[in-house]
Amino acid sequence: MKALITFPERCTSCQICELYCSLKHFNVLSPARSRISVVRRFNTPVVCVQCHLCLNSCPHEFVSKDNKTGAVIISEECSGCGTCLNLCPYGAIKIDPTTKKALVCDLCGGDPECVSRCPEDALAYLDPDKAAYHKRVAFAKLSSRR
Amino acid sequence: MDQWFGYMGKILRADLSECKITKEPLRKDMAKSYIGCTGYAVRILWEELKPGIDPLGPENKVVFSTGPLTGTLCPGSGSYEICFKSPLTGIWAEARSGGVFGPKMKFSGFDFIVLEGKSEEPVYLWVCDGEAEIRDAKHLWGKTVSEVTDIILKEIDSPEASVACIGPAGEKLVKAAAVVNDYYRVAARCSPGAVLGSKNLEAVAVQGTKDILVAEPERFTEAVIRAEEVALKNPFREFWKALGTPGLLELNNAAGSLPTKHGYTTYFDSADKISGATLNSKYLVKREACFGCPFGCGRLTEVKHGPYSVPPHGGPEYETMCMLGSFCSHDNLEAIIKANYLCNNYGLDTISVGNVIAFTMECYERGLLTASDIGGKLEWGDSEGILALIEKIARREGIGDMLAEGVRSAAIKIGKGASELAMQIKGLEVPAKDPRGEARTMALQFALAPRGACHMHPNWPSAWDSSKFDDGLKPFGLPPPADKFAETGVGKGLAYKLMSLHGTICEIMGTCIFYVWGFEGSCLTPKNYAEIFSTLTGWHMDQFELMKAAERVWNLKRCFNVREGISREEDRLPKRFFEPVATGPAKGQAVKNLDGMLDEYYESSGWDTGTGVPTRKKLEELGLQDIADQLEKLKHPN
């Protein structure tokens, strides 16, 4: 099972990932409906890290996990109540402005479009061991404040 | 209701005199003829502006314009243009900027925002998801661009919105006043800031969550992936990534085409002190791309300590580094970064301001202006003098009041032959290019660009004779690249025509022109744009039809200027470009036969060689018969 890793230091805030995400899922171009979001002022992509804190949050049990990829799956019946948004520490879940349902990265079923389309290699979809290495580096940077 | 793909299908109109907002449908016939952005806007302004109006009067209109590809996956989709009649030049004006404002404007639901009339009190316009309101801005008047932006973002309670605003310079109707979006992205040239200032409009804020619909998603995805793969092979990509536009400083200096000391020469001995590489090694914080751009030439810089300290801020770009650097024989990079920061916060065009400061330095050297006229000495390269003049121009204090009217007007006021020194064309200050050292197509570009002296609108033509690129234009009959210093008899008129139309395609699509330079397979060609446009909108248009639409727009812009009194007489260059370059690799080079080159251009474009006016035959061929009729009526009112 792979993990989606971000490299914020490489991100230029071009938002191309957001456009491909909305195009792939909804056939439209709309950053507001992208499951990955770039925070422009910090040039940093934010996307679900599959921590699964949200899994048991939904009052209606509309949030589940894809056993193949580990991605969080929001059911079509979602009412957009926002409970899972409140629980997510990363702000990685949004409400789709058109469908009014919760929106979260589904890893494109195991072949994330944003990763293959990022022109700066700021996103990667890696095996657990490699992903863990990069997470350690990110955590170490944070801990040592460098 | 009509379904629109690629376009949002709506125009927002704000009548500031009546404090009234209206929404109009976009017209399909017009979109098909003029595509969008400056193309659609020139048709609006041709129809709605009477010739001869006062650009600073309520009858002028400002069109914030996006194109069908703005905000999409076409590489470089972060563009928008502000179109109006310029108070600096009195003719057609278009000022482009990147960042995120253009895409956000589209996601807010509008392709165009037309601003008309004049508000009694300062106001700003807030546009969000298909709705708009005019809000009080009395408390914003006099504040800097970053203060205005911060306050508006807080007031509208929409931190992801994008704000385009004027600063103190626009409020004071300075004719080098810019509109600044996203804190440091600037629609600078021709003084859009003064026109907004004259309307008492401080800012336009946009935010939206609307979709851009795609007519043929699968084929569109294939087309944009093809375009992105081409873009990643572009010969300039690594250069833009590594150095951004500031890298052009050392590149141009090595070639002897870096405008220096007000055009006395094109080689700057201290270029390494203000180069892109120096900027990178000492002051770069991070790269920052415009929306939808895989090049990402933009950069954030910071000066941490000392008298010129500046917080992390966008730029300076090449044009700024040259105009406020080598053009003023000025080699203090920290002072240039500070000057850029000041200009962005006052809302000033760094090109026009740098030009007019260098002009003032030369006038001082020649004794045409004294220290008491200027308010102090002004030697070449004087950092403090440059920063002081920026403040004076922004506030119209002392000599700044005269300089704020632009170099053409200031030179007339000074008299004593100063007009011969002024580096301007059609009233617009010459930017950081020099046709003597760079390439002679640049002479045509300067003489013919619709907004006056401009290196980019619609294209950088030296790609062909300086860099030897074909830009994928062979199917249109582009001649083989000629020697860069050759003038007539080698097809420069035709090459310039094709390159300017290629650039016009980008412009009317609403994308950045940085993608059009290179070779077939490494740059975006009219074929790429036709493919992306067709699959996005579902309107099938091939590269030749698209080129024709660009030609229609280019000719209509010329007709707009003809209606304002422009003819061949005004397609001139400043005297200095006919004088030999004093030093460096291009020493001795001068433009010799501009008239011969113009003849070749007019002939290849179907313009009358005597008057420089598009012929009726050409206008009819482009479907512009009504324009030809109206021009004729103007000439013979009875």
Image (cartoon, coloured by chain):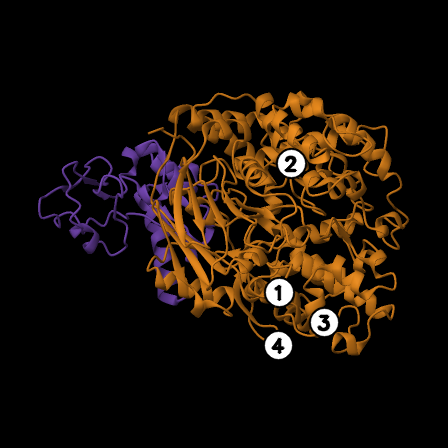
Mark 1 and 2 residues: CB-CB less than 8 Å, in contact? no
Q: Nearer the viewer, mark 1 or mark 3?
A: 3
> Of the residues shown, which amino acid type is indicated by label 2?
Trp
Asked if both marks, 4 and 1, belong to the same chain, the answer given is: yes
Task: State the SS at label 4.
Answer: loop
* Chain ID of residue with mark 4: B
Residue at which label 3 appears: B399
- Total number of numbered discs in the rendering: 4
Mark closest to the chain's N terminus, 1 or 2: 1
Residue at which label 1 appears: B337
Asked if both marks, 1 and 2, belong to the same chain, the answer given is: yes
| Residue at image coords 34%, 31% | A27
For chain B, the rendered hue is orange
Q: Quadrant of the N terminus of chain B?
A: top left
Mark closest to the chain's N terminus, 2 or 3: 3
Mark closest to the chain's N terminus, 4 or 3: 4
Residue at which label 4 appears: B307
| Residue at image coords 62%, 67% | B394
How far apart, in angstroms, are the residues tagged by discs 4 and 1?
A: 12 Å
How far apart, in angstroms, are the residues tagged by discs 2 and 4?
A: 40 Å
